[in-house]
Amino acid sequence: MHDYLKQCIRSLSDFWQCDPRATAFSVNGSGGRGTDDEWSDADVLLVVGDEYYQSVRNEMREHMQNLCGGIRIWLPEGEADRYINYAFLFEKDGEQFLFDHALFCESWIGEYYTDAGEILFDKSGALTAASLRYKERKPWFDATAIPGLIDKYLLYAYINGKYYRRRDYIKMQYLQNTLKDIHLQIMQAVHNETPLSGWWCADIRNFSTEQREVIMLYASAPDCNGAAHNVIRELACFCRDAEVACSNTGFTYPKENELYVLRQLKDAGLPVV
């Protein structure tokens, strides 16, 4: 992380610690994990008393402008009733920087868990407790959804046959996105001892080499023929993962449905072995 971003984090920590409305402040993201590099942006999290949430929101841009630098783009995102994140691009001495500043009500932090990263101050202990709950969390996946997810994947894989006959590359790519999302949901049941975050860019680190390669295939086909080859490899990997998911959760894997889809894809001209 750039030295100036680190300086901004220290300035913000000092500023918020002196503000009686603030109860906790931390560095999360790669900076909080200690995995940042020279290209990393800054991610911080601020907790305030519920009664002060709106007043802090109203002042946020002004404070960031004063403490960080000239703001070029200001993007409130992920807004809910008790939290919001501000992503903003700013400039200092001719250099451009990206910052993410999350704002939470203390009541939200008290009810849920969050990956707080490196906590710089915590006046009430609520953020520390929420961070501990995050580390001790159980997998979120609903095992009863597995049979439906497998059927959904196989059905969408089947539709590739129609689009391949038409050489409709755009719709095949659309299906790739859908299939990837379903596959990633199944992976939580495969990795049932490791709670996944739901953000596949981070979760993929928990997968095997082959699983990582297949997840990346979903976005890599240059044309219809490439997509057709990817569909078959993706389907084979998904079915293996789905069998493990069924075994882990007590469901019977629908092998006959897999074979039915493969026959149809082969008839459509996809390279089924």
Image (tube, rainbow, N blue to C red):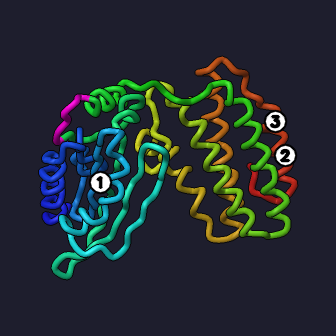
Q: Which mark is residue 263?
A: 2
- Crowding at dot 3, Cα within 10 Å, few <14 / some 14-19 / many 20+, comes out as some
Q: Amino acid at mark 3?
A: Asn
Q: Position of residue 161 (x, y in %)?
A: 82, 57
Residue range highlighted in magenta: 120-125
| Contact, mark 2 vs mark 3 (Cβ under 8 Å) | no
- Location of residue 108 with respect to 72 vertically, above or below: above
Q: Nearer the viewer, mark 2 or mark 3?
A: 3
Any magenta on residue 262? Answer: no
At 33% from the left and 58% from the top, the residue drawn is 100
Q: Earlier in the sequence, mark 2 or mark 3?
A: 3
Q: Position of residue 154 (x, y in %)?
A: 76, 43
- Location of residue 88 with respect to 131 vertically, above or below: below
Q: Amino acid at mark 1?
A: Asp
Any magenta on residue 123? Answer: yes
Residue of label 1: 43
- Tell me the element at label 2: helix
Q: Which quadrant: the N terminus?
A: bottom left
Q: Amino acid at mark 2?
A: Arg
Residue 86 left/right relative to 151: left
Q: Earlier in the sequence, mark 2 or mark 1?
A: 1
Residue 161 left/right relative to 226: right
